[in-house]
Amino acid sequence: MYENYYPNIVAVSKTFKIEHINHLIEFGHKHFGENKVQETIEKWTEIKKRDSSIKLHMLGKLQTNKVKLAVRIFDYIHSVDSLKLAKKISEEQKKYNKQLSLFLQVNIGNEAQKSGINKNNLLELVNFCNESKLKIIGLMCLPPFEKDSSPYFDELKNLNNQFNFKEISMGMSHDYETAVKYKSTFLRIGSKIFGERN
């Protein structure tokens, strides 16, 4: 069932100081996730200069006024959820001659308090991104926390397949084992690696 299946582990290092992360870097881990642009710049700029193989993932909601800085430091954005944000990313990438790998965040549980595009508007966003030559590699979701993630991962996987995306960002510390059953290619794991945040 899992033959030749090797998901990428994004170590969610947000809020942790670099001394808590250095052992993973030294071990050779490459994918790290952050939520805030300014914190990422302060924490990772010098490390990225020394080791360009480190890949930084923007996991939190990205404000359009922070896109300029985000494009410079991040390699992946998991939270593209609107035409406005996609347009801004496209504009800034051209300025820096850099192409990021992007996930479209889907509000898979239709939760009012969560970011993510409504499933009914997804096709429009995908078409816009394709026309803008953005590098969309897959979909991302945050299922309702208190419910079984399985039906939500199943639905996102089916949507992902409809668009022929190769990657998919599903699963966190509490439900990554479920995400593996649905062949998530990027698992976003924080507390299971670094411990609980203060």
Image (cartoon, rainbow, N blue to C red):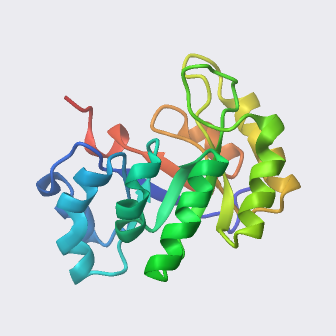
- In front here: 70 or 35? 70
Q: Is residue 120 left or right of residue 80?
A: right
Task: List the single residue furthest toward the left.
Answer: 19
Q: Is residue 91 left or right of residue 157?
A: left
Residue appearing at x 43%, y 79% in the figure: 96
* Residue 182: x %, y % from top left: 72, 46
- Hey, which quadrant is residue 106 in on the image? top right
Q: Is residue 195 left or right of residue 147?
A: left
- In front here: 84 or 188? 84
Q: Is residue 60 visible?
A: yes
Residue appearing at x 24%, y 32% in the figure: 197
Residue appearing at x 70%, y 73% in the figure: 133
- Hey, which quadrant is residue 161 in on the image? bottom right
* Residue 109: x %, y % from top left: 69, 25
Q: Quadrant of the C terminus?
A: top left
Residue appearing at x 48%, y 31% in the figure: 174
* Residue 21: x %, y % from top left: 21, 57
Label total for image: 0
* Residue 151: x %, y % from top left: 76, 29
Task: List the single residue furthest toward the right.
Answer: 162
Q: Is residue 101 visible?
A: no
Q: Quadrant of the N terminus?
A: bottom right
Q: Is residue 12 depicted above or below 127 in this figure?
A: above
